[in-house]
Image (cartoon, rainbow, N blue to C red):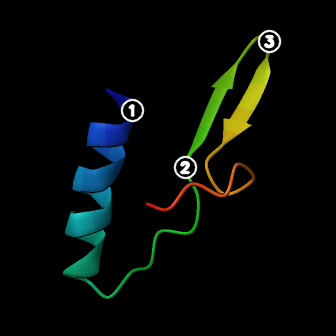
Amino acid sequence: MDDILTEKIKKGAAYFDIKLIDHLIVSTEGYYSYAEQSLNW
């Protein structure tokens, strides 16, 4: 689900020449960064 939402946001941001540089998932246990994991999105 997060991957699908991120892709939609990325495509929408591109219409305004905005580059998405990371996607953070934050919880009480910590966080997960797509950029830190070197995910190609």
Which amino acid does the dot numbered 1 rest on? Asp
SS state under label 2:
loop
Is tag 2's residue or tag 1's residue first in the polypeptide sequence?
Answer: 1
Residue of label 1: 2
Q: 10 Å neighbourhood of mark 3: few (<14), some, or many (≥20)?
A: few
Give the SS element for disc 1: helix
Q: Quadrant of the C terminus?
A: bottom left
Quadrant including the N terminus:
top left
> Which of the pair 7/40 is nearer the observer?
40
- Residue 39 screen position, x and y as percent: 57, 54
Marks 3/2: CA distance? 17 Å
Q: CA distance from mark 1 to mark 3?
A: 17 Å
Task: Classify 7 as above or below 5.
Answer: below
Mark carried by residue 29: 3
Residue at 21% across / 66% down in the picture?
A: 12
Give the residue type that dot 2 points to: His
Q: Tell me the residue at 29%/71% (across/down).
A: 13
What amino acid does circle 3 point to?
Glu
Determine crowd level at label 1: few under 14, some 14-19, many 20+ residues with C-alpha closer than 10 A. few
Circle nearer the N terminus (3, 2): 2
Residue at image mark 2: 23
Separation (CA) of disc 2 from disc 1: 9 Å
Q: Measuring 36% from the left and 39% from the top, which residue is drawn there?
A: 3
The answer to whether the residues at label 2 and label 1 have Cβ atoms under 8 Å apart is: yes
Identify the residue at the far top of this view.
Answer: 28
